[in-house]
Image (tube, rainbow, N blue to C red):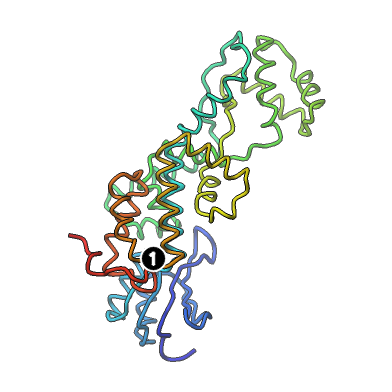
Amino acid sequence: MPDRAPRVLGVDEFAFRKGCTYGTVLVDVEAGWVVDVLPDRTSETFAAWLTEHPGAEIICRDRASAYTKAVKEAAPHALEVADRWHLLQNLSAAVEKTCHQHRDCLRKRAEEDKGTEVPEPPPMLLPPAELPRTQIIERTRHRYEDIHRLLEKRWTISAIARRLNLDRKTVRRFRDTDLDELLASARDRRPNGVLEPFKAYLNARFTEAQGQVSGTRLFLEIQARGYCGSRQVVRKHLAALRAGTAEPVRAEIPSPRKITSWIMRPRETLTDSQNERLLQVRLACPDITRACDLARAFADLVRHQRGYLLLEWIRQAEQDAPKPMMGFACFLRRDLASRFHEVSFPGVDQNHGKCP
């Protein structure tokens, strides 16, 4: 490779093995090809490369602090910018977190809509369900405890990530998110399985019979309705009902990730069905509606290079946005003067981007 770095250098991390080993890829942004691959993602390795390959005038990266430390040490005259892809990725993460925090709004509306179709209350009340002790939920609990134990000892994000073999973004998420929200997210990620569409029927039959019904009989009944799974799965669910550990069957709501995908995609690419479901989400939750409007406005100014609108967008988000969106806006204001430039936001006034 040439001795000098390209004029516009792109830098980003990638996983050799996700959650364990990471490297750094360096790209000539103007030419569109890979310049080099570094064996890790530390600031020391990147700083050494910049020292050996001077000449970068613009360095385009995400918000990782390790890279900016290397730039300040080895290429202090280079201008740091945030690329559009990472900006929209950070925005998408803020939208998804907002959807996670307000899923109860969606659940409440879905249950209200479902309530008009539900028959008379069952004659027998099932014991309250406990959060199932699945592998992913237990892993989430232990990871949260490990990260917060190290945070209490004043470990840095990078040090915790190295110690626990985690991505720094994962450590930040566990630092900034309540345990209940993390557990709910872990529960939502569990696969539904072939029995899920038939659980409402099984629960209704179970309560109707006061629990006095055989698994074989119920297996044959749902098999006639299209169930393709095993008899053992049905018996396991009935055992959970008798023990009071089965989760209640809830009205279906779209996942936070799916809602985020509808919001972040250009409106003209959504189907009529997707537009209708997003409308129902907006009607159910004012905070998700506000996040949606702000996200679409931000994506519009980035995609159409309307940097002169950025500061006004930040002001609006800081005034009345949901907390994750407000955090994203504060990140923009904090780093505007030192990172964002014409590459990201043509027309933005750098002088007014500085924090007071």
- Vertical side of 245 occupied by 209: above or below: above
- Vertical side of 207 occupied by 286: above or below: below
Quadrant in the picture for the C terminus: bottom left
In the picture provided, is 200 more to the left or to the right than 27? right
Residue placed most toward the observer, 183 or 162: 183
Q: Position of residue 287 (x, y in %)?
A: 40, 40
Image label count:
1
Residue lying at the far bottom in this picture: please name it.
3
Q: Position of residue 193 (x, y in %)?
A: 67, 37
Q: Residue at x 63, y 14 (%)?
A: 119
Q: Residue at x 41, y 81 (%)?
A: 8
Residue placed most toward the observer, 321 or 11: 321
Q: Position of residue 52 (x, y in %)?
A: 37, 87
Residue 102 image-quadrant placement = top left
In the picture provided, is 39 more to the left or to the right than 191? left
Three-letter residue code for mark 1: Arg
Which element carries disc 1, helix, strand or loop?
loop
* Residue labelled with disc 1: 306
Residue placed most toward the observer, 16 or 14: 14
Q: Position of residue 174 (x, y in %)?
A: 40, 47
Q: Residue at x 22, y 64 (%)?
A: 354
Residue placed most toward the observer, 340 or 220: 340
| 10 Å crowding of disc 1: few (<14), some (14-19), many (20+) | some
